[in-house]
Amino acid sequence: MIRDEGKSRVSPYCLYSMQSGVGPCGRVAISGLADAVVEMKFVGADGETRTVRKGDPEFSFSVVSLGMLGICTHLKLQLVRNFDVEQCVYGSWPAHESHGPTGAELSDALAVLPEAMRSCDAFSLFVDFSVDAPGMLILKRFTPAAAGDASASGEREARKGEKCNSSVGFSPKQRFGKLLLKNDAVYNFIEGDTFETTVKGRWFDQLHVWMKDAAPFGPQGAPELQFEHFVPLRYAKECLERLHLIARSWPGILYAEIRAVRADDQALSPYNASEEDGFDTLAISHGIHSGLGEERVLQAAAIVEDGLSDFNPKPHWGKLSNLTHAKASRMYGPKLEAFRHHVGNIDPEGKFSNPWLDEVILARRS
C-alpha cells in the first residue's frame, strides 16, 4: 500500500495469499509467501554482504532460515497483476449460529470441503471444534481487475469492497450441501470488526479476512494465543474429525482456521508433505483465549500434536509449539541436517543463533 496524505493508494502489482483452492490435477494452486521470494541480500556474521537468487544451490535454505543466515537487507519478490476477488460465504459465525434452517453440523462442512476447494482460487474454513456446527466457509475466486479501477491502474484512491451483483457476471452458488449462502454481514468478527460476507471487492480488502479498507482490523476483540500445524492435505477429513474429538470439550477456543497450502522448495518449510503424501498441506490454526495463559495453550498444542502424530504434523515456526530437536529431525529428516551444515558454513560461531535455535535446530545445549 502507498499512503499519500492520509489516503490509501495501491500499486498495480501485488502478492497472492497463503490460502488456496485445489486445481483440476489435485494439487493446491497457490503456495505460501516464501515462494514469491526470488532474491535475497544478507549481511553475514563477518560483516560481508552476499546475494542469493532462486536457482542457486543455497536458495532452498535461505527464505525459511529462522534468521540464522544473517541480516536480510533486501528482498526481491515475484509479483502478479492486481485482481478483484469474488467472495462467497456459507454458514455463519459465531459457530453456534451456523446450523441454519437445514440443521447443518460440522460433519456437513467436512463433507463438502473437497468440492468447495476445487471450486475456488482460495478458501478458509472457520470452525469452533467445541461446537458441532459447520462454522463459516469462505470461498474466493480471483478475477481480472476492472479497467480503470483502483486495482488496475494503481492511481485512484482505494475503495471499500462492493456488494456482489449477479448482473456483472457473479452468480454465487446458493448452497454447498447443507451450508447456505450468507449475504448479510457478520458483526464483531474475531478481530472485533464487521466482516462483509458475500461480496466482490478489491484484492487489498478481500484477499484476507483480517483486512478492510486496505488496512488490518483492530484493535483485536479478544486477545489470543495461537498454534498452527500443517498436515498432508490428503488426510484433511481424518485430521479434522480427530481434532473435533480432541477439542470438543475445550474452554476458551476462539476459532480454528483451515486453509490449504501448496508445497514449495524451502528445506525447512512446514508446507511440504512427502511425495507419498501428495506434497501439499492443510494448515490448521487455533486461536485460544490468551486469558488461559501460555502454559495451558502449550499443553493444548501438545495434545493436538500427539493426536495428529500419525500424520506428521509440522508446527508453524512463528507460533507456539512444543518442538524439540528430536521432533524436528523426524519431521524434516535429511533436510534439517543439510540446513545445519549450511548454517555451520555461513555462521560457524553461531552469532545469529539463540538458546532455542541452539537446542532445536543445532542440537546444542547451553
Image (tube, grey):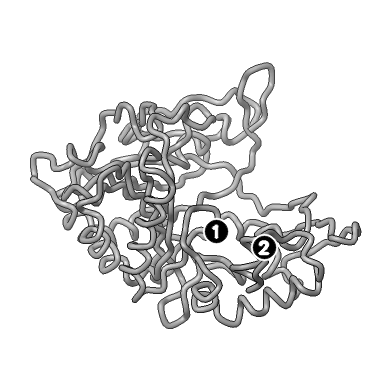
Q: Quadrant of residue 61?
A: bottom right
- Residue drawn at point x = 34 percent, y = 69 percent: 306
User: Looking at the picture, which amino acid does disc 1 mark?
Assistant: Trp
Q: Position of residue 162 (x, y in %)?
A: 41, 28
- Image quadrant occupied by the N terminus: top right
Q: Position of residue 29 (x, y in %)?
A: 47, 61
Q: Position of residue 51 (x, y in %)?
A: 83, 61
Mark 2 or mark 1, earlier in chain: 2
Disc number for residue 141: none
Q: Is residue 237 left or right of residue 219?
A: left
Label 2 residue SS: loop
- Disc 1 target residue: 317
Disc number for residue 65: 2
Neighbor class of circle 2 (other Cα within 10 Å; few <14, some 14-19, many 20+) is some
- Residue drawn at point x = 77 percent, y = 65 percent: 350
Q: Is residue 145 left or right of residue 126?
A: right
Q: Is residue 357 left or right of residue 237?
A: right
Label 1 residue SS: loop
In this orientation, which residue lies closer to the viewer: 331 or 50?
331
User: Looking at the picture, which amino acid does disc 2 mark?
Assistant: Ser
267 shown above or below 152: below
- Residue drawn at point x = 62 percent, y = 32 percent: 10
Query: Looking at the image, which residue sits at the far top?
Result: 5
